[in-house]
Image (cartoon, grey):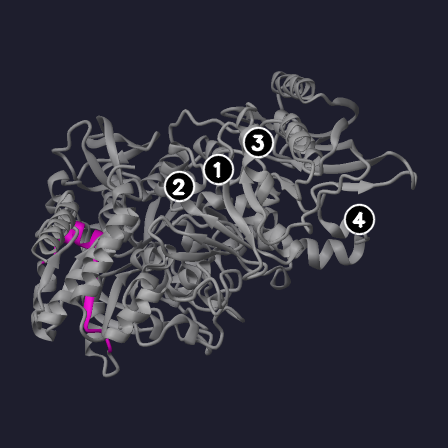
């Protein structure tokens, strides 16, 4: 869906992409794909005024539509484009990312993912070996996520007109009647659960990027969350909402939910799981892990009474071992995300403006 | 992380706050010189923890913010040239010049690259012999040794296609300018930790004596800041005005001799214009005669630049600690990190950007930011 | 102008007559110029700014603020006992 546009990440994305507003630009900047405020500008000022309708304008990760008014299930539908450099990175590749991304967008709506399609834009000169590796990886990702790739398309563009390979995946899943997860459903007192460590994907990608390269054993967390969400909904059917915090990180996802539900969010810094290497890289580059991308984590907002049991259930699942309650939904400061710092002070977590700037100087 | 985690400890922070509360008897205004220190204050809510009678004002220590409009426009002129690969630290990319920023140049096809280290720019020059590689060498004393090292390395390797656009600034003349200003309110300084790591703190002793102002060389973590504040407040309360080193794990009296020697070789002191502040004598560094052939200003004629500074911006007063970001009419309305008008909003280290990033413009919110009881009591006790 | 992060030196070598090294930041290892900390030994911490080591971290000095806090606590305990 439009709320999760493609994941093009480059050095410039991390090291400063233009923060200037959409309205002030006659050209698309990299920042318009950042998942932050510029992306939101593009959606709200260009796409929605022209294309908006009741379903699209909800800006959930997936559209949920009924084919027949009294059917037992509804259809969940989503699409997502993938452009990532390098195309092979620690812990995955663009193919795996493309399958998991679309599967996860369906899963966040409580859907069981069934079918996906893939459209490839290939740049002249891409090696067949690389393409085979990517397609093989997509096959494995589909198998493990329990989806079938049932449609595809290929186009080739002149050398220099593409970045090796772009992949667009669309997905269809089914949602049982009565299950209505929504970013607009959160209530004060609800607990914010994170399924694991944050920032792993963004930092793993950065570690192999020209100009920023550093050595680490860290890998991208790219993974299907469909089985985790199935187990979670089995244990706690009244989960209000789930989001996978991809580009823009946990901060952007929480801002979207806070805005949709007209509530505030209060986070506890010390409760948020962050891997040592991610912390190290963030310190080094002056980044905040709250803004760094994830590809195999989710945020769930749940009624307080259900939180402890759900966290226990998640911890027993391989994709939720580090699950934790990291904060609470509040009636105060609607639309805002506030974090209590380690030394006891509080600060507002703002929405990413353009792209996060490392404080290198 | 060793040397970071222990300096972010809540229990230790509380002890220091208690120690500060124990010595404060009246209001004091203290300036933290560095942008990095400003960030720590707002990120951890340190000012929220302090007795109300202590006012922190934010200093000029953000090199991105104080880089003059002329220097930025000059950078844009150089970066626009077809033969140039223009390398810069990330934050400089979105600093508005008179006609847009480096990222807009990039979207129009200029080869603008972000580097983590100036030494990476030298590597790029070596790898692109048919291109002119220009590095935008900005910064305070902290960044002078790495930038000087890049020039020195390029000289050693005989790289003819590498040059630097230098806009270096120095801290002590700026502190003096702040103290000389008729509207100065600063009674003590938290001195710039990493600047002093490089050059030491002997240079600050005459300032402390002459203006009778305590200067405590301070690090960048919450415990560092609170220790610096504690020491500065003690000096103020006891009527002392000395240079103290509260960052002794990284700062020696005479700094780093190797760095000082290289800086003296590659650079020489010059007058420098600071954005929003004006020209300050002997407040900058330029390439020394021996390295003048690495000067991008010489290599590319980029004279005749007319600058346009927005009238509404009060960043000059903010950089001198006279006013605070939220006192600006444009703050968080017309001027935000994604629509920056002034330099202090552009750089992550800038006081305006720090206030914005950590939601200081939203803090009228009644519940979240209500002061805790003991702070009220502390204030009443004063 | 202040982003200097402490990291542990894990490897050193000379490259075109300049002392270089690898510095570990919590499991992330970055190539760093060590030319201005020539006496650095493996395992020691240095403050790194834009890929350049500014200075070695003095571990003994680093303990001082915590010793001060401990002494303050002992003083408080003493006061409590006196009372």
Mark 2 and mark 4 lie on one chain; the one further toward the N terminus is: 4
Q: Mark 3 and mark 1, same subunit?
A: yes
Give the quadrant of residue A310: top right
What crowding class fits label 2: few (fewer than 14 Cα within 10 Å), some (14-19), or many (20 or more)? Answer: many
Give the quadrant of residue A216: top left
Q: For marks 1 and 2, give the CA distance.
A: 9 Å
Look at the image and tell me in which quarter the N terminus of chain B lies.
Answer: top left
Total number of numbered labels? 4
Q: Mark 1 and mark 2, same subunit?
A: yes
| Mark 1 element type | loop
Q: Are marks 2 and 3 in contact (CB under 8 Å)?
A: no
Task: Give x and y (percent) for residue A192.
Answer: 55, 44
- Which residue is tagged 2? A282
Against B71, residue A225 (above or below) is above
- Which residue is tagged 3? A296
Q: Are marks 1 and 2 in contact (CB under 8 Å)?
A: yes
Q: Is residue A26 left or right of residue A220?
A: right
Mark 1 and mark 4 lie on one chain; the one further toward the N terminus is: 4
| Mark 2 element type | helix
Asked whether B136 or A224 is in front, the reply is A224
């Amino acid at each position: 869906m439009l709320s999760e546009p493609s994941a093009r990440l480059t050095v410039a994305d991390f090291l400063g992409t233009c923060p200037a507003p959409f309205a002030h630009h006659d050209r698309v900047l990299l920042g318009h794909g950042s998942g932050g405020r510029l992306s939101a500008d593009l959606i709200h000022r260009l796409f929605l005024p022209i294309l908006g309708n009741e379903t699209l304008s909800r800006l959930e990760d997936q559209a949920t539509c009924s084919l027949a008014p009294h059917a037992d299930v509804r259809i969940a539908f989503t699409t997502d484009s993938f452009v990532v450099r390098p195309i092979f990175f620690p812990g995955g590749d663009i193919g795996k990312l493309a399958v998991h991304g679309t599967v996860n967008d369906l899963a966040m709506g409580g859907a069981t993912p069934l079918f996906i399609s893939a459209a490839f834009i290939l740049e002249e000169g891409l090696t067949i070996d690389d393409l085979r590796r990517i397609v093989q990886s997509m096959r494995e990702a589909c198998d493990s996520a329990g989806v079938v790739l049932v449609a595809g398309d290929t186009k080739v563009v002149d050398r220099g007109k593409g970045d090796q390979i772009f992949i667009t995946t669309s997905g269809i899943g089914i949602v049982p009647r009565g299950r209505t997860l929504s970013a607009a459903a959160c209530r004060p007192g609800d607990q914010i659960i994170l399924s694991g460590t944050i920032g792993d994907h963004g930092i793993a990608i950065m570690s192999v990027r020209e100009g920023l390269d550093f050595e680490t054993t860290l890998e991208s967390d790219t993974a299907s969350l469909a089985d985790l969400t199935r187990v979670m909904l089995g244990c706690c059917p009244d989960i209000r909402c789930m989001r996978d915090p991809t580009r823009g990180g946990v901060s952007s996802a929480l801002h979207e939910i806070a805005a949709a539900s007209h509530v505030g969010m209060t986070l506890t810094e010390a409760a948020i799981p962050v891997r040592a290497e991610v912390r190290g890289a963030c310190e080094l580059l002056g980044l905040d892990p709250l803004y760094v991308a994830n590809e195999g984590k989710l945020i769930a907002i749940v009624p307080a009474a259900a939180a402890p049991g759900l966290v226990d259930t998640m911890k027993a699942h391989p994709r939720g071992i580090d699950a934790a309650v990291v904060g609470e939904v509040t009636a105060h400061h609607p639309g805002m995300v506030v974090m209590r710092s380690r030394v006891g002070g509080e600060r507002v977590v703002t929405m990413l403006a353009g792209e996060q700037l490392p404080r290198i100087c | 992380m060793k040397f970071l985690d222990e300096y972010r400890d809540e229990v230790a922070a509380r002890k220091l706050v208690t120690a500060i509360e124990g010595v404060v008897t009246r209001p004091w205004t203290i300036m933290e010189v560095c942008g990095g220190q400003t960030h720590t204050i707002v990120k951890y809510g340190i000012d929220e923890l302090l007795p109300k009678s202590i006012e922190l004002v934010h200093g000029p220590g953000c090199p991105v913010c104080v880089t003059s409009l002329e220097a930025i426009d000059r950078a844009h002129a150089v970066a626009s040239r077809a033969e140039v690969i223009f390398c810069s630290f990330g934050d400089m990319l979105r600093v508005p010049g008179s006609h847009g920023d480096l990222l807009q140049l990039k979207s129009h096809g200029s080869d603008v690259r972000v580097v983590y280290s100036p030494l990476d720019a030298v590597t790029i020059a070596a790898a692109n012999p048919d291109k002119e590689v220009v590095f935008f060498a900005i910064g305070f004393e902290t960044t002078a040794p790495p930038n000087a090292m890049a020039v020195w390395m390029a000289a050693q390797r005989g790289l003819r296609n590498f040059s630097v656009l230098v806009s270096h600034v120095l801290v002590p003349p700026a502190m003096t300018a702040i103290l000389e200003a008729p509207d100065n309110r600063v009674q003590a300084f938290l001195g710039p930790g990493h600047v002093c790591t490089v050059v030491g703190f002997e240079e600050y002793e005459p300032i402390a004596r002459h203006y009778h102002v305590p200067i405590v060389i301070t690090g960048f973590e919450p415990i560092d800041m609170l220790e610096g504040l504690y020491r500065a407040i003690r000096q103020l309360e006891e009527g002392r005005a000395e240079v103290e080193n509260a960052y002794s794990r990284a700062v020696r009296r005479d700094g780093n001799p190797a760095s000082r020697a290289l800086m003296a070789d590659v650079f020489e002191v010059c007058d420098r214009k600071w954005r929003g502040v004006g020209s300050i004598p002997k407040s900058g560094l330029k390439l020394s005669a021996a390295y003048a052939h690495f000067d991008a200003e010489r290599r590319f004629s980029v004279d005749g630049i007319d600058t346009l500074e927005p009238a509404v911006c009060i960043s000059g007063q903010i950089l001198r600690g006279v006013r605070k970001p939220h006192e600006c009419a444009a703050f968080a309305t017309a001027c935000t990190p994604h629509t920056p008008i002034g330099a202090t909003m552009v750089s992550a280290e800038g006081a305006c950007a720090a206030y914005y990033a950590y939601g200081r413009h939203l803090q009228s919110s009644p519940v979240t930011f209500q002061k805790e009881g003991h702070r009220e009591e502390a204030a009443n006790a004063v | 102008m202040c982003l200097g992060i402490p990291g542990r030196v894990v490897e050193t070598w000379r490259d075109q007559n300049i002392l270089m090294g690898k510095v570990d930041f919590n499991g992330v290892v970055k190539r760093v110029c060590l030319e201005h900390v020539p006496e650095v030994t493996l395992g020691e911490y240095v403050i790194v700014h834009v890929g350049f080591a500014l200075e070695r971290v003095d571990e003994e000095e680093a303990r001082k603020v915590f010793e001060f806090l401990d002494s303050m606590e002992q003083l408080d305990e003493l006061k409590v006992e006196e009372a």
